[in-house]
Image: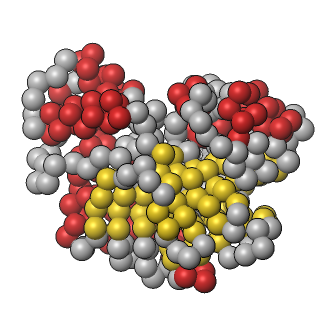
Amino acid sequence: MLKLDFLNVGDGDAILVRDDAADFVMLVDTGRPHIEFTKGSRRTSVINHLMRERIDHINLLVLTHLHFDHIGGTLPVLRHIPVRRLLAVTLPPEGAPWIDSSVSEEKTIVGLCDALNLYSDIVSAARENGTLCETANPTAERLTPQLTMLPVLPEEALIHRQKKQFDAIFRGEPLSEDVLYAVSKERNISSMRLRLTYAGRTVLLTGDSYAAYWENDPEEPCDILKVPHHGDEKSMTQKLLDRLRPEYAVISCENAESPKKERPAQHVLEMLLQCVPHVLCTENRAFHHYPASTQIAVRLEIHPDGSIHHRV
């Protein structure tokens, strides 16, 4: 049986994947560095959930892209649980120096520099622990006798451009504010997507890749979809949803209402409810025809016969 825990880390992503028969544990993203707990919420940190589930090893840790709500909880995991392998789109240069984020007053640029510093610390800590750190290849890999993973990478030109600019930042080379702002804003569309197959079923984990960026890709239908970018207005288009046709859609979001970030966006939620038999949120405020809820995790199970079960 394959267990999928979409963790309630508030405004962020973390997905625990387990093939119990093969004693295989995979973690995709790790949420934020600090979880803001609010009244009535059941949010949890990744490390707390792993300890609660008595996870004593991680075979594969995948970081989809460099935003704090996806990589922020990684260091505590590395400190407490052996991780055999780490997979990402790009890796920082070995021995990368600390980046001075005061080079700009632009919030997005400061955030990029801070995220690169954290990522460098993550990869350094992983290597010190003996974790094999690799860049992903867009080829299918059999992880267990029944579980296969296919990384879907962003455009090659984007990967090369991003790697070149990230390395230049680490080296302290002067880059214009326009270049720094642009490379920061490309982090979401540079997300690695993962297509997992098990017992004839397909799980699509999408990071924060905006739907418009890949709606024309030759993406095949899936059974379980992790909705990208927390279900906001950029997360899904009707064109892409018509092609994916999932049976389950999971949105990782928080129940706080914000005028800047509508997650999930009401029109996206309505689109999903019209097209997907089962729409689940890790946490959400109340909508018309969709009640508010909060839980530690959304758990889906794929059984060896291919049946999918939602466990509460």
Judge whether 165 appears above or below 170 on screen. Answer: above
Colouring scheme applied when the structure was drawn: secondary structure
User: Does 259 sit left or right of 66 as displayed?
Assistant: right
**Residue at the location (60% across, 83% down)?**
21
Q: How many marks?
A: 0
Indicate the position of residue 115 as horizontal and vertical percent values: 31, 43
**Residue at the location (16% across, 49% down)?**
93
**Residue at the location (42% across, 73% down)?**
59
| Farthest-out residue, right | 289
Q: Can residue 171 be seen in this view?
A: yes
**Residue at the location (31% across, 53% down)?**
135
Judge whether 271 appears above or below 252 on screen. Answer: above
Classify the position of the C terminus by image quarter: bottom right
Indicate the position of residue 186 as horizontal and vertical percent values: 39, 29
Indicate the position of residue 164 as horizontal and vertical percent values: 20, 34
Dividing the picture into quadrants, the one containing residue 67 is top left
User: Does 44 sit left or right of 130 as displayed?
Assistant: right
Classify the position of the N terminus by image quarter: bottom right
Q: Can residue 251 be seen in this view?
A: no
- Toward the viewer: 207 or 97? 207
- Toward the viewer: 11 or 302? 302
